[in-house]
Amino acid sequence: MIAKQTRQADEVTPDFEAEADELVTHYPVSKRSASLPLLHLWQNHFGFVDDSGVEWIAAKLELEPINILELVTFYPWFRREAAGKTIIRVCRTLACAMAGSHEVREKFCEAVGLDPHEDHHGFGCAPPTTPDGKFSVEFVECLASCGSAPVALINDDLVENISPADVPKIVEKLK
Amino acid sequence: MLSLLPTPHPKERRIIFENIGIPNYAPDIKTYLAHGGYESLKKALGMKPGEIVDAVKAANLRGRGGAGFPCGMKWSFIKYDDGKPHYIVVNGDESEPGTFKDRYILHEDPHQLIEGLAISAYATNTHLAYIYIRCEFPHAAKIVWNAIKEARAAGFLGKDILGSGFDLDIYVHQGAAAYICGEETSLLESLEGKRPYPRIKPPYFPAVLGLYMQPTIVNNVETLCHVKHILRLGPEEYAKMGTPGDGGTRTMCVSGDVVRPGFYEIPCGGVTLRELIFDVCQGLKPGRSLKAVIPGGSSAKVLRADEVFKIKAKGPDGQMVEKETPMLDLVMDAATLGSIGTMIGSAGVMVMDDSRDMLWVLNNLNRFYAHESCGQCTPCREGSLWMSKMTTRMIEGQARPEDPANLKNIADNIAGRTVCAFGEACSWPTQSFLAKFPEEFAK
């Protein structure tokens, strides 16, 4: 027997739809402009964007699904599969790398139980995620906080001046 | 968060960061109004729109996002009464490596941006504006949204602002982690809900064809904040702080191997590199010597510590003479850095000491550009990737004798062959690192 596929769009609530409709009003000239806001709304709510999400947003904005899918596959922020509940995004770019962000990323991987050598598989994929679904760790490009390098964006919060020795404590607080 | 020095360094002159430097300064409207907030907007609404554009021109304000285009001139491309809808889009997609000033303005003084934006909108007959904020600043987006709601409730936004008959709506729009969206036409495509491929030029300015193919101004966050202060101080007073053609203050972001990295608001042309690194930022780490500086965000061409430049300056008799200027004595302004083939850009100053391997540094930047190339133009998509693959192979001990020449060849064939300036941005690091540190690539 084939397991029943779950479709995110089946879980859309009236409140969610009202929020989506409100976002569309921010763009009185062209509804299509609401593509990114609706993708953010969707991913924040469901954790990732599945085919039904692409179709739902496209229908809401009177677009073809490809118009939405091409955004999901372009922007690094969006993913087509679930990531960890806590996403640790360590900055990889110059000032942070000079201040030791490679070691910081490795320490985060060790502290949450990920193989530091496992790489991100590209746009649309979730970053390396622990089997219990609690943590993802990935390198991202410049987070615009070079003066307090190295930094990481942990869900919505920026953590600055991270020393590798601090990492286990930071992770302990997140558990 | 990184904080300002409790008292400004003598080289600093805080205008944009004046209030942010006050202990416990909050980003709400009550605090803002208690510190003279929205007074410049009131003044603006009593002026003719053309007078505001002229004031911004007279102030010699240059864009603070990277390209440094004169702001007043950009605005004057908009014809006030052309019968078309106009838009202003604020570029808050701050993502040039080495740059971290707008982050603090958005988080700590959002009303300053809203006031500057409202003045700009009034001057250009604009009734709809968007503030594009990168999604890696989720708190900033909330703070700015909240500030917009406060300003609207207080009558500084919305219909008939302060009884002037002028209407303005502002919305926040969040990006999705793509560096290319900092390029203004890419940002507009992103805001239109499309893949953010930069648009083909000409037209060179969104003021001709911008958002929804209508006249549009795209300005950086810091730039719009300056507009408020131009009206507050008067354009002459404002221009006087800087150099001719580069008025006011500029927020220099210093990162890398200095004792006190941070952001410092300094009059344009008000410091040399030596003063910035060794005085304002308290020098290098103990026992280290200076090796290189990237002066204006990661795309700006690197400077080598022992370089000496010939800079044109006025001699004692008033004649222009060429003066030998060591790298550390370069004045940090748009004209000086432009004259030696690099740029002040976004004023993101990245300092490297003698412990740094320049091949490693270049590889870090090459990986950044390879990741961020949007893929629209073949030279950039393929070239940035190959430069990154080659420098990665080189640092892994697999360098070949022909690598430096091949790297240069690739870089030389990207710049000038792409739709947007990303082509230059990704080839300048490779070109300048190879030219200035050849010994480190000949290993």
Image (cartoon, grey):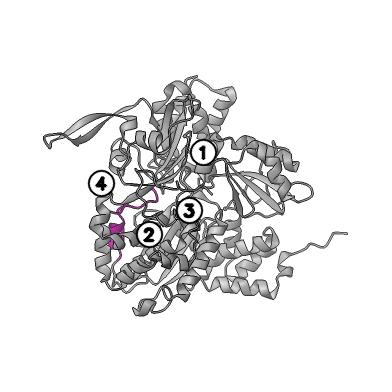
Q: Which residue is mark 1?
A: A95
Residue A96 or residue B432, whichever sits in front: A96
User: Would you say residue B68 sits in the magenta stretch?
Assistant: yes
Same chain check for tags 2 and 4? yes
Name the spot of residue B60 as percent of width and height, x first.
26, 53
Disc 4 chain ID: B
Disc 3/disc 4 C-alpha distance (Å): 25 Å
Q: Which residue is mark 3?
A: B104
Q: Tell me if residue B144 can be seen.
A: yes
- For label 4, the residue is B243
Q: CA distance from mark 2 to mark 3?
A: 14 Å
The local crowd at label 1, few if under 14, some if 14 to 19, many if 20 or more residues have their Cα within 10 Å, is many
Residue type indicated by callout 2:
Leu
Determine the secondary structure under disc 2: helix
**Structural distance between the alpha carbons of marks 3 and 1:** 18 Å
Specify the label residue B84 is tagged with: none
Tag 3 near tag 4, CB within 8 Å: no
Which residue is painted at 55% across and 63% down in the image? B142
What stretch of residues is rendered in magenta?
Answer: B58-78
In the drawing, what numbered circle is on residue B224?
2
Left or right for B332, reference A114: left
Q: Nearer the viewer, residue A54 or B367?
A: B367
In this view, the residue in front, B311 or B280, is B280
Left or right: where B36 falls relative to A82: left
Give coordinates of residue B164: x percent, y percent.
Answer: 33, 78
